[in-house]
Image (tube, helix red, strand yellow):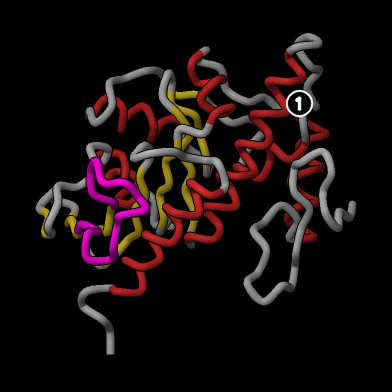
Amino acid sequence: MTDPNHFDLRQGIVDTCRQMNRNGLNQGTSGNLSHRIPNGMLITPTSLPYDRMQPEDIVAMDFAANYQGNHRPSSEWRFHRDILRARDDVNVVLHTHSTFSTTLAIHERGIPCFHYMVAVAGGNDIRCAPYACFGTQALSDYALKALEDRNACLLGHHGLLVTAQTFEKALWLAMEVETLAKMYVHALAIGEPPRLSDAEMAQVHEQMKRMRYGQAPDLDGVGDVPRASPEPKGAAH
């Protein structure tokens, strides 16, 4: 029988939010997370610290913006709703203010194809959306545009946004993009790094598709893949 209260998803949101903080992707009450449910979504409440958050605190909202719960939904509910409504391939929307991604976003700078792992976000770069005030429809519109044919983008003067099918994959992709952002910021200290060509990136996409490389590890441990970190564990090329 289907749980009408979606307890497992609510617990998954709480667990993932706390993991974001443990991984250094977030701090305090910044960032937010949602998961699709029939005709709507579950989303983190506004201004509630993750270490105090419980499954019953998660807010249920339909696509018409009607919500139920003990708290108001995250102020960023618009881009969560609009992404889930527009993207059938997405179940989870995760937003963080992770340090290096936000550093680039402050400069309105995306992440180019300086490293082949940029391809894990779905394209040859990770775009940065123009700035708009948090919680506005303009921000949601910019985010949707930046996410066209992509699973991650930066939000100008704001932070990082990733989409995925599961909590595990969303958290994995957020960590990958933050690692790429850190590498890019450090590379810029030497100078603007060279880019891989379109042909080289096409080869990367094909290789990743063929090998299932660059995807979140399966939960049973099959298909584990290297990270973008300088010292990947168990890397195989």
Q: Is residue 84 left or right of residue 180?
A: left
Toward the front, the furthest residue is 52
Q: Residue 178, percent across and down? A: 61, 36
Residue drawn 39% across the image and 57% down it: 88
Camera-nearest residue between 201 and 235? 235
Residue drawn 28% across the image and 73% down it: 6
Q: Residue 177, percent across and down? A: 61, 38
Looking at the rendering, which quadrant does residue 58 occupy?
bottom left
Q: Is residue 136 left or right of residue 145?
A: left
Toward the right, the furthest residue is 237
Q: Residue 84, percent across and down? A: 33, 51
Q: Residue 214, percent across and down? A: 71, 52
Toward the bottom, the furthest residue is 1
Q: Is residue 234 above or below residue 150?
A: below
Tag 1: Cα neighbours inside 10 Å, few (<14), some, or many (≥20)? some
Q: Disc 1 marks which residue?
A: 114
Please give the range of residues in magenta.
44-59
Magenta segment includes 189: no
**SS at circle 1:** loop
Residue drawn 14% across the image and 51% down it: 71
